[in-house]
């Protein structure tokens, strides 16, 4: 949902689609909600990234999981994990080639429109949403919670929330903050 002061990538819902994509495999248990190519095709059609008639093969499916794992890694790195050059390399390999049409929209602006079909088109649309959110400085709002390992969109005013807004995590966050505040006193001035 758009909030005041939010910028285009979030308010247009594109970043939310990326969040939904990352969250198709989620939580500490890494629950998989896209177990097969047809589940992926249905998910993409539901998010208007692919036509409902399109079908996907095993290679498309494997490529999508690689893309998802790579993007999940980028979010985890933003939330404090160490960057793995190997995962980054696999992510870049998974991107393949993207094709575009460039069109002038009016006398002042031009647009770059992903084209092609099937999974490569859906992939370009997804990655475009990531690029757009990075350019709009909104990518930083996509986070993985240190408590439940769920992906979430931090739509707080300052965008500084580390924990998801789930009830359990909010109480863990409060007790951790309390522990941190008490910690140094217990250990004394020399720590
Ligand atoms: Zn959480």
Image (spheres, rainbow, N blue to C red):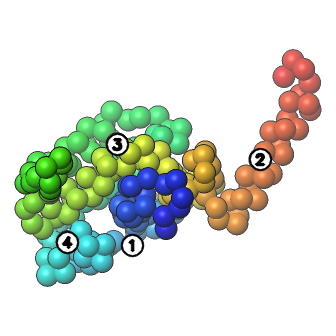
What residue is rendered at 18% in x and 48% in y? 109
Q: Position of residue 15 (x, y in %)?
A: 39, 58
Residue at 92% across, 32% down: 186
Residue mark closest to the camera, 2 vs 3:
3
Distance Cα–Cα, label 2 vs label 3? 34 Å
Q: Is residue 77 left or right of residue 135?
A: right
Numbered disc in front, either 3 or 1 = 3
**Residue at which label 1 appears:** 33
The answer to whether residue 112 of the structure is visible from this angle is: no
Q: Quadrant of residue 13?
A: bottom left
Hey, which quadrant is residue 189 in on the image?
Answer: top right
Check disc 2 and report the residue beneath it.
Answer: 176
The residue sitting at 78% across, 52% down in the picture is 174
Identify the disc placed on residue 135: 3
3D distance between C-alphas at marks 4 and 2 = 43 Å
Lower position in the chain sequence, tag 3 or tag 4: 4
Q: Is residue 39 above or below residue 177?
A: below
Label 3 element class: helix
User: CA separation, marks 1 and 4?
Assistant: 18 Å
- Report the front residue among 138 and 122: 138
- Label 4 CA crowd tier, 10 Å (few <14, some 14–19, many 20+): many
Query: Is the Cβ of the residue at disc 2 closer than 8 Å to that at disc 3?
Result: no
Whether residue 14 is visible, yes or no, is yes
């Amino acid at each position: 949902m758009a909030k005041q002061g939010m910028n285009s990538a979030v308010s247009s819902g594109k970043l939310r689609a990326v969040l939904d994509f990352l969250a198709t495999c989620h939580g500490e248990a890494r629950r998989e909600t896209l177990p097969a190519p047809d589940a992926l095709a249905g998910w993409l059609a539901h998010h208007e990234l692919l036509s409902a008639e399109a079908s996907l093969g095993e290679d498309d499916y494997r490529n999508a999981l690689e893309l998802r794992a790579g993007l999940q890694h980028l979010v985890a790195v933003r939330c404090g994990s160490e960057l793995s050059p190997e995962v980054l390399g696999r992510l870049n390999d998974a991107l393949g080639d993207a094709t575009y049409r460039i069109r002038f929209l009016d006398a002042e602006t031009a647009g770059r429109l992903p084209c092609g079909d099937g999974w490569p088109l859906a992939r370009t649309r997804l990655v475009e949403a990531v690029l757009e959110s990075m350019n709009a400085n909104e990518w930083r709002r996509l986070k993985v919670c240190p408590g439940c390992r769920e992906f979430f969109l931090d739509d707080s005013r300052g965008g500084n929330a580390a924990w998801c807004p789930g009830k359990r995590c909010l109480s863990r966050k409060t007790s951790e903050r309390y522990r941190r505040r008490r910690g140094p006193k217990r250990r004394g001035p020399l720590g």
